[in-house]
Image (tube, helix red, strand yellow):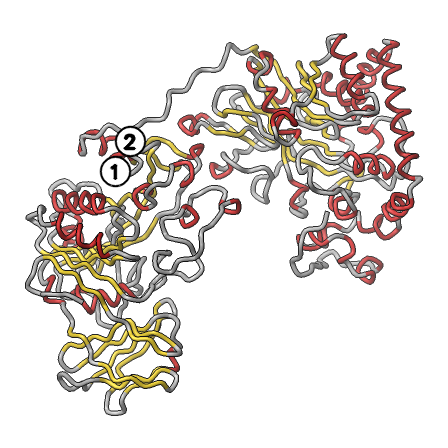
Amino acid sequence: MSENLTASRVHTRITTHSFRAGTLLDILTDDQSAKAFFKNDTDIEDIEFSENLNEETRFTLGNAPVVFLNDLQPDEPLMISVAGEKKVLKPRPVQTEAFRGMNVLFAEVNGQAAKSVMMWLQYYVEHHGLEGVLLLFRGDAEKLISEVIRRSKRIKALKKLICLEFDAPLGAPDLPPATHPFNCPTAPGKDRMDLPEADPETSPLAAMQIWEYARHAYLNEAAAVANLDVSDFVPPIPDSTLFDEAKQSSGEFLPLAGTLCFPWRSRDKGLPRFGDHICRQFDQSSVLPRWCVVPSRIAPQLRWRVRNIPKAHPGTSLPLQFYRAMAIRHPGVETGKLAPKSSLIVDDALKSLSENLLAYKPVLPPKLTAPKKIREGSVTLVTCMKNEGPFLLEWLAYHRVIGVTDFYVYTNDCNDGTDTFFDLLQEKGYLQHRQNPFREMGLKPQHAAMFAAMEEETVQTSDWLTHIDVDEFITIKTGDGTLKSLFEALPDMNMISMTWRLFGNGDREDFKDELTTEAYTLCAPEFCPRPHQAWGFKTLYRNLGIFKKMGVHRPKGLNAQLYDKINWVNGSGKPMPQKDYRNAWRSTTSTWGYDLVSLNHYAVRNSESFLVKRDRGRVNHVERDQGLAYWFRMNNNGDEDRSIHRMLPALRAELEKLMSDPEIAAAHEYSVRKHREKINELRATSANAAFYEELNSPRLQRLSRMHKYFGMNVFLAGPASVPDEVVEKDLAEDFFFTVEKTETQH
C-alpha cells in the first residue's frame, strides 16, 4: 500500500486478512471506534472481538458482515476471532479528510481503458463541477492505475483522486468477467453463449458492503457524493450540476434513474465513446437506480447501498436521469451482442448530446428502403408440407374461400404424392410449389422456406402475409367469415394475431377421407393458459417494411426505427403490448382473444394419422419426437366449437369445383391410398401397434378432457405423471394437480 494523504493523486492497496472460515476486508478506526468489514464468505455468528470492546452493532450487507465497535484505545491492536481462529490486527485510520468539502464521484473501474476513464472524469469536471473521485479498481490494475494517475494530472480542476484496490477478489465466484456480454442484462442468446471460466477478480461486484465501507473510509466528510459507474453520464443541467441538485434537494438524498444506451456502431471499437451512444431500447421501461447524497444528511444508522439508501427520504424531487453507455461498460463487444438491434431506436436527446454538446458524429442506423409496390388486398400464405396429401385439398379450398389470394408451398422428401400433387396444382394456377432448400441453406425446413419465400416477387408485393401449416385453419368470426370482413373490422391494424384453439381427436381412432373442419369439433376451452402450446399464435401482417422477414409465429427482424408504426391486435381486436413486439409467439392471460379471429389447430387429427405424423417428423423442432407427451399436450377434447361450420357450404362448393378436374381428383385419391398404406405399414410393427393402442386407451381418452385440472409441469412430464386415482375419480371444479418440474418429455 502506497499512500500520501496530502498528495492529489493516491494509490491505495488494501491488504485483506484471511481466516480459515472467512475474510476480513479491512478494519477502520477513528479515535475510539472501529468498523470491521468482512467478505460474504464469513458467517456473522462466527465473529468475536476482545472482551474489553463494546459492540455497537453488527449487520450484513449482501450477506457480508459488518461490525461497529466502541471503547477502542488509540493505536491499540484488536483481537479478532473467526470461528475460533484468532488474529491480532491494527485498525487502519479513516481518511475522510481527503475529500473534505468536495464534490466526489465513487465508481468501479473494471475492464475500461485509461482513456475512457479520463474522458469520463473530464466530462464531470466540465459539466458538473467534479472535484474528487474515489475509484475502485478490479483485476490486475497496477499498470492501469499508474496510467490513470499520470493522465489525470492534466485535469487541473480535479483536486483529489484516490485509486483503491484490494488484494482479494470482490466478484461473484460463479460468473465470467463483468465485461462479458453474459453479464449485460439486455444481451440476447445467453443460453447459447460459450462462457469463459468464472473469474471473481473481474466478475460483477459481489461485495455489497463496499459502499458503506467507502462511506466510512473516505467519503463521510465530502460535500456531496454521487454513486455512478465510469460508463454513466448525467446530462448537463442548466445553471446547475449533479452535486448542486443533491445539495438543494428537499430529501436526504437525490435519487438517480439510469437508462441503458447503446451505439448503433462505435466508430472506434477499441475505444467506444459516450458520443457513440445514441440508441436505447424502445421496449425497455425499467430504470437503473443510483443516488447522489450529502453525507452529513444521512443518519449514522442508515446504510449506503448500491441502488439506494434504505429508509432515507428522497424528498419530492423526481429522480435525475443518467445514461449508462453499454459499449463503455462492455468494451470490445459489438452492439448486437449487448442488445438485439431490433430493439434499438435513435433517442433524440442522446443524438443531440452527441452532436451538439460533444461535437461528435455518431454512426446512425441505415436508412430504410420502402417495400416494392404492393398489390392492394392481396394475401399470401406460405407453408411447408411433407406427406400431407390427403389433407391439402381441403386446406387449400378453405383458405381460397376466405380470401387468400396466393399460396407458396415448400415440400421435402415426400413419398405419398404430396409433391407431385402440388406440381399439378401449380400447373393449374392454384398455387406456387417449391422444393424446400433447407439442406442447401443448413436451416430447419420452416425457416428455410420462409427465407426463400421472401425472395419471391409475389411475396414481396403482397399486401398481407402469413405463415400457417396444413393442420391450421383461419377461423373468422366477424362478417361473412372472410379475410375481407376481418380487415374491414380492423381497418387501421397492420398485425393481427390468431391464437390457436387446439382441436382433439374426439376419440376418433381411424383415418377416413373426410373434412377435418367438419369431423373434429371437440377442442380446448378458449381460456386455456396450460399447456403453453395451447395459446400459440400465428400472425397476419401487412407488408410495410416494419419487419425484415417472415417468422413461424409472427414476423421477425423488427426495424426498430419503425416500431411506432406497429398497430398490432389480438384475435379480439385488442392492442398487443409493446413488450411483445420483438419476440412473443403465444398469447397470455392478458393478450388472448377469439372474438374476431382464431386459428383452429388440428394437431393430432385421428390416431392412425398421428402415426404417420410422428413417423415423418417435424418441420421446426426437428430433433423432437412426437410421442405420448406430445399427444397428451395437443389432444384436448374438453370443449366444443363448431364456429367454422358456417363456412362448410362454401368449402364444399370450392372442393367440388376442384375435384371436378379428373387429374386433381386422381391425385387426391392417390394420396389417400398412400396414406392408408403407410398407416397399415406402421401398424404392422409391434412398437407402433402398442403405441396406437395406448393412444386409444380409456386412460388417455379421459386425460384429454382433464387438461384444466393440471399444472404446467404435468404437461412437461407427460401423461404417466398423473396417478391413476386422479384419472379415475370425479373431480371437483376447483381441483388442481401438478408435479415437480422435470425434463420435458416429447
Q: Vertical placement of 597 versus 584: above or below? A: above
* Callout 1 amino acid: Arg
**Residue at image coords 55%, 28%:** 555
Percent across and percent down for residue 476 are 68, 26
Q: Residues within 10 Å of mark 2 (few under 14, many from 20)?
A: some
Q: Residues within 10 Å of mark 1 (few under 14, many from 20)?
A: many
Q: Quadrant of residue 266?
A: top left
**Residue at image coords 20%, 43%:** 115
Residue 283 appears left or right of 438:
left
Q: Quadrant of residue 462?
A: top right
Q: Earlier in the sequence, mark 1 or mark 2?
A: 2
Q: Secondary structure beneath disc 2?
A: loop
Residues at circles 1 and 2 in contact by the CB criterion of under 8 Å: yes
The residue at the far bottom in this view is 52
**Residue at image coords 22%, 52%:** 144
Residue 426 appears left or right of 302:
right
Q: Secondary structure beneath disc 1?
A: loop
* Callout 2 amino acid: Arg
Inter-mark Cα distance, 1 to 2: 9 Å
Residue 267's tag is: 2
Percent across and percent down for residue 444 are 64, 32
Q: Which residue is mark 1?
A: 273
Percent across and percent down for residue 389 are 81, 23
